[in-house]
Image (spheres, helix red, strand yellow):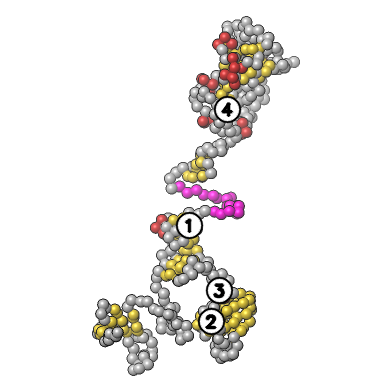
Amino acid sequence: MAISDTQKVDYLFKKIGFGTTKTDTNANKLAANESIASPLLLRGDKVWQQAGDIPAVKPSASNSIIGVYTGATTVECTEDITATGNRTWKTNSTDWIPPEFGSTYLVNVYIHTSGDAANAEDISNKVFVTGSGNNDEWFFDYQSGVLNFIGDNLPNGVNFSGKSVYIAGARYIGTFGVGAAAGEDASLGNLQVSNNILSSVNTDADIRLDPNGTGQVEIVGTNAVTIPSGTTAQRPSGNAGDLRINTTTGNLEFYNGTEWVILTEQVDITTVDTFSGDDTTKVFTLSESTTSTSIIVTANGVVQSPGNAYSVSGTTLTFTEAPATNDAIEVRYVSSAFTLDSTISNGSLYATVSSTNVEINTDVLPDVDATHDLGSTTFRWNNVYTTDLHLSNMNKEQGNDVDGTNGDWTIQEGDENLYLINNTTGKRYSFVLKEID
């Protein structure tokens, strides 16, 4: 026995009206008493991703989202031969835009000579959705693109011989699926996606990538990652771990929770070779193969000049002159070093090493007072360019070699004289200068 229409209606009422499963007849269990959820299926692959861009009025021509079918493009349908004759016609196209987007999207139906779509849209060929008063209404399924003459009769007075049903309307031809279409903006919570740019909707809001548990954030590829850059004055207040390029100093820097710190390459002394001079030997064998730029050579604590005082080839160290007897020679291997044009900086103070000089924007101080020399008896600075010259041996136990006393003096320049100031007594003197030709 066939399922009664009453049971079919009860199924639809419970399914569509209440979103529940029909488990009994309406007489035994009302729709409000059904408890098993049965929501309608919403297929993600059929979601009209760009539906928000469909205008309220049907456009006159097709675009990337809407296909308009009118005139020569009016769709000629094929008869569904599984139904009774001329009862159902198929456009063989899905996703027609329904009138819920606007009344102009209601399709128009015409019955006209087969193979003549360009002339189908004529008022004399049109059949109306409400019929002609002869129970000959039609219904169009916008999802499947199928027209059915749902009334008891076919259109009144129409002879279908040599004719087809034509549909004029609009279809959604945009992107399907959940999410925004390529090239379109989309919102996800407080995030905005525009093309390949992810930004926060709220001004000055953070964007966080927070993996679950022990997971890590990975950026893969073989290219590079661009991090923020700006001047020292543009530094943010900083959170521990912040990383940026300082365009004032040209350095990579990070915030350690208290201050901005420059990331500089570490110079690591990994190995030290020691030798003793004998006033004869010039060539010494090193423990590692190296180059003159990768080692620091000292004799009795004085750094030797590569190329002038020594040369290196592989594991062979050759001095220009044989170190004197008992000279303590040390060779330190530097595992990594700064290249030319590198800048060592803490943000406000820096030293830049170039091929011609070392530029420093702060004082250069020895680690202890009155102990280290600037140059030596054999390696002297060529010229010293300075303003005032301050001379003092006040912190030395032994005074000068003439009378053994200590003093504190300053030499200053005048337009015609040189002046000498005793910083202890405050007395001032001028040098006696004799002009020569």
Instruction: Determine which of the numbered discs, if any, sits on residue 309 in the image.
Output: 2
Instruction: Determine which of the numbered discs, if any, sits on residue 293 in the image.
Output: 3
Instruction: Determine which of the numbered discs, if any, sits on residue 172 in the image.
Output: 4
> Which numbered disc flags the more N-terminal residue, 3 or 2?
3
Q: How crowded is mark 2: few (under 14 residues within 10 Å), some or many (20 or more)?
A: some
Q: In this view, does 159 lie to the left or right of 350?
A: right
Locate residue 248, reporting x and y percent: 43, 60
> Which numbered disc flags the more N-terminal residue, 1 or 3?
1
**43 or 87, which is in the foreground?**
87
Locate residue 29, reporting x and y percent: 64, 22
> Which numbered disc flags the more N-terminal residue, 3 or 4?
4
Compared to residue 211, the image places residue 271 above or below, namely below
Amino acid type at image mark 4 = Tyr
Instruction: Determine which of the numbered discs, if any, sits on residue 244 in the image.
Output: 1
Look at the image and say whether residue 210 sits in the magenta stretch: yes
Nearer the viewer's eye, disc 2 or disc 1? 2
Could you say whether the residue bearing mark 4 is in a helix, strand or loop?
A: strand
Q: Name the residue rendered at 53%, 80% in the picture.
A: 308
Could you say whether the residue bearing mark 3 is in a helix, strand or loop?
A: helix
Residue 143 in view of the camera: yes
Amino acid type at image mark 2 = Ala
Q: Is residue 435 left or right of residue 27?
A: left
Q: In this view, does 303 lie to the left or right of 47?
A: left
Residue 153 in view of the camera: no
Amino acid type at image mark 3 = Thr
Q: Name the residue rendered at 58%, 53% in the picture.
A: 223
Q: Is residue 152 left or right of residue 367?
A: right
